Amino acid sequence: MHLQLLTVLIPLALAQFITSVSANEPKSQVKKGTVTMTVSLNNQNLLMPGKGRVHLAVDLKATNKAPNKRLPMNLALVIDRSGSMRGEKIEKTREAARHLIKQLSDKDRIAIVSYSDHVRVDLPSQLATEEIKKQALDAISRIHAGGSTNLSGGLFRGQSEVQKSMASGQINRVIVMSDGLANRGIVDTKALAQHTQKSAQRGVSVSTMGVGTDYNEDLMTAVADHGSGNYYFIKESSAIAAVFSQELKKMFSTVAQNASVELLLDDGVDLKQVFGYTFRREGEKVIIPLAELFAGQKRSILIELQVPVLRVGNVAVGQAKFRYNDVIANGKETLAEANLNVNVTKDKTLVERTRNRSVEERIGEVEVASAMNTAANLVKEGRFGEAKNVIRRQRSMTMSQSRAMGGSKRLKKQAKELDELEALFDKAKAAPASAPAAIKATKSKGYRLKK
């Protein structure tokens, strides 16, 4: 049997391609373009009787070539100036912010917001001319640490500054940095995530940077996820500048903007889970927003579906779409579509023979990421023994999956990661002061693995 796989290379002009993923007619359509979309099912054949569960993988790969002319930036830096930022943290943050500001051109916009008990706009959003950049550098120098952590107030004001100058054809981004627990304003993770999601739907994405080991990593991750941005765990203050540069480099090399994956599911087909990404429903559509893709970036979205297995034969699952504005093609809208079908059968041998190895490996990776998060939460509660049991069970399962495939480098790598994680938890138990860093590092690793 052929591996059931769809590959669509998106062209540089406004266009639409439709192809199919099915048991009997695997098709691929290749065009020169900016983003490659690969749509696969873990098995095109479903057993009857059976649960009807199927996993859909949507993989995106952006071209390695950055645009000749980058998009202008519309940025707001939101900086924590609470008391816990005193010393090296605030110094390194100022240093990183200065470096970022110096990289901007007079076509970019910059705003600087800082927060402690109260929120302060240190520099309203303005074009980054040489004079404004001097004012921005002066504003950064005047930021000093002291007080509590009104993260929500800083976030909201940063979004407001970016929204003042919203326009198509530019990157609209808020970068939020914090080293502590939000203890002023809105502190509820769900409420902040919902607010950020609404702002992202209006075109303002949010990236978050957690510094040290005292901040709430679940809150910072949720804000970045719902804000269609990036989350960074910065263990040491000395790494702040490198992370700021990494975020700026990604934005400068953006090749796809306003990107989203859309699902249209046929009657009777239910969406069970989207792993690692937020989504929303608009009528019959399921929309997974991605904001931008930068040159060379890969995205892997794993989706679990429930398909009715009421009769033998072909069953239509629905349609997967990838929509975005192509920066290299002057922002033209591009759309790729794939029709999804499965074959319901009573042949167990056929089902076993047509497993899609790549998607099965991806399922295994996501399971490892979930185990990492579960184990980290147990460590946070001081339940080290239970955390180790979670890791050991997952390692055993991961190795079993690898053996069933005749050996999988991807899954063996994850088993090794789990071994290292168990050793990390042992160290954290022996030296409790190291536990917060172990928790954040583990969750950060799981976060990246789901992407």
Image (cartoon, rainbow, N blue to C red):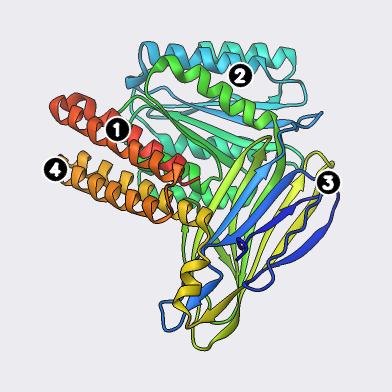
Q: Secondary structure at mark 1?
A: helix
* Residue at (39, 36) in percent of width and height: 444
* Residue at (54, 61) in percent of width and height: 280
**With 325 as the anchor, is 154 left or right in this view?**
left
User: In the image, which is nearer the foreground, mark 2 or mark 1?
Assistant: 1
Q: Is residue 184 visible?
A: no
- In depth, the one of 443 and 285 nearer the eye is 443
Q: Secondary structure at mark 4?
A: helix
Residue 14 badge: none
Cβ atoms at labels 2 and 3 below 8 Å apart: no
Cβ atoms at labels 2 and 1 below 8 Å apart: no
Mark 4 nearby-residue class (10 Å; few <14, some 14–19, many ≥20):
some
Mark 1 nearby-residue class (10 Å; few <14, some 14–19, many ≥20):
few
Kindly report the distance in space between the C-alpha atoms of the residues bearing marks 1 and 3.
44 Å
Residue 88 against residue 426 in the figure, above or below: above
User: In the image, which is nearer the foreground, mark 2 or mark 4?
Assistant: 4
Kindly report the distance in space between the C-alpha atoms of the residues bearing marks 2 and 4.
44 Å
- In this figure, which residue is indicated by the disc labeled 4? 385
Between disc 2 and disc 4, whose residue precedes?
2
